[in-house]
Amino acid sequence: MIFVELVKGENAKFIPLDPTSAPTRSVDSRGSNYQLGIEVYRSPRYMSGSVFLNSVFSNLGVNILYNSSLLTLIEELVTAPSLAVKISPEWAGRPFHVLYT
């Protein structure tokens, strides 16, 4: 599972709308692709649960008051093993699998 924090617009370029395509390049001078960030909700990876936004965790936390079964979901997400890999700028915009080949 891939967790991507889309608070920063430049992170959106790592999420292709089509999972079989390479990520799109940024469209503005800061390196962010705001159009892609807006459309991420319609992407197959988001809809399948492969990508989460940081606001999802806040919403889940608040909704525990109304639906206690969400606590199990949050526990699983928090305790799942994860790995953060820092990449150099020249890898930005390249497909994830190329990083490890």
Image: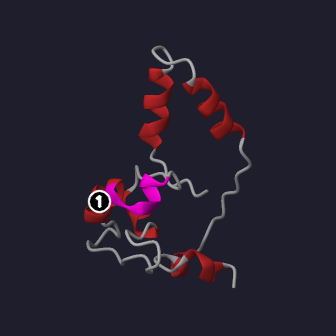
Q: State which quadrant residue 91 falls in.
A: bottom right
Few, some or many residues within 10 Å of mark 1 (<14, 14–19, 20+): few
What secondary structure predominates along the stretch shown in magenta?
A: helix
Magenta stretch: includes residue 95? no
Q: Is residue 96 left or right of 79 when viewed as pictured?
A: left
Q: What residue is shown at x 35% (from left), y 70% (from top)?
A: 31
Q: Is residue 70 left or right of 39 when viewed as pictured?
A: right
53, 84: nearer the viewer = 53
Magenta stretch: includes residue 43? yes
Q: State which quadrant residue 18 falls in.
A: bottom left
Q: Quadrant of the N terminus?
A: bottom right
Q: Is 51 located above or below residue 59 in the figure?
A: below
Residue 7 location, x and y as percent?
40, 49
Q: What residue is shown at x 33% (from left), y 66% (from top)?
A: 32
87, 77: nearer the viewer = 77
Q: Is 80 located above or below residue 10 in the figure?
A: above
Residue 6 location, x and y as percent?
42, 53
Q: Is 73 located above or below residue 94 in the figure?
A: above
Q: Which residues are magenta?
A: 42-48
Residue 82 location, x and y as percent?
70, 52
Q: Quadrant of the C terminus?
A: bottom right
Q: Which residue is mark 1?
A: 39
